Amino acid sequence: MFSELRAGLPPGVDGWGMSLKGMMTIVFGFGLGIVGIYYWMNRVVVPQVEADRAAGKMGPVKTKKKKEKLSVGESMAVLAKSPYIRDLALLVVAYGICINLVSLFYFPPFYVAGGGCWAYSTSL
């Protein structure tokens, strides 16, 4: 959306700045939405839940069980024994390698062609 904005701008207008302003406006709007939802939850939903709990409409509050604290070494041993965690760690490392390879082999042709960031973002 913002990548193609540059093509329609008159000469002398900073396309990168226009894209940046547009994206920051979207980020700011989503931030205001999150603040509004947080405010609404604390003003409307939480008092209703507390009133329902006090009136006995909901079950009692569950107490948490005490967990034994593990040292760093014991925690690493537990994580190393879990095949799920090992696979997840392998996935994260493989993702990092792939991202580095893409940035090494995919981006330079755009810079050689003289397009820079715009050539890359419009190619997506």
Image: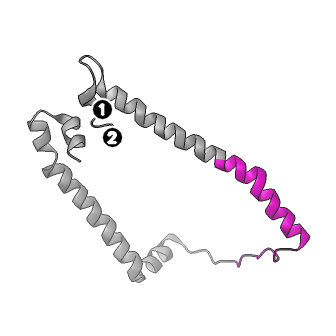
In terms of image quadrants, where is residue 92?
A: bottom left
Q: Residue at x 16, y 50 (%)?
A: 104
Q: Nearer the viewer, residue 108 or 4?
A: 4
| Main SS, magenta residues | helix
Q: Nearer the viewer, residue 27 or 83?
A: 27
Kind of residue at disc 1: Leu
Q: Which residues are magenta?
A: 37-66
Q: Is disc 1 surrounded by few (<14), some (14 to 19) or many (20+) residues within 10 Å?
A: few
Q: Residue at x 82, y 76 (%)?
A: 60
Q: Quadrant of the N terminus?
A: top left
71 in magenta: no
Locate residue 86, reporting x and y percent.
Answer: 36, 76
Locate residue 105, reporting x and y percent.
Answer: 13, 51
Locate residue 93, reporting x and y percent.
Answer: 29, 65
Q: Residue at x 74, y 52 (%)?
A: 42
Residue 72 as seen in the image, left or right of residue 9: right
63 in magenta: yes
CA gap, disc 2 to disc 1? 7 Å
Kind of residue at disc 2: Met
Asked whether the beta carbons under mark 2 and mark 1 sit within 8 Å of each other, the answer is yes
The residue that label 2 is drawn on is: 1
In terms of image quadrants, where is residue 80?
A: bottom left
Instruction: Report the disc number at residue 5.
Output: 1
The residue positioned farthest toward the top in the image shown:
12
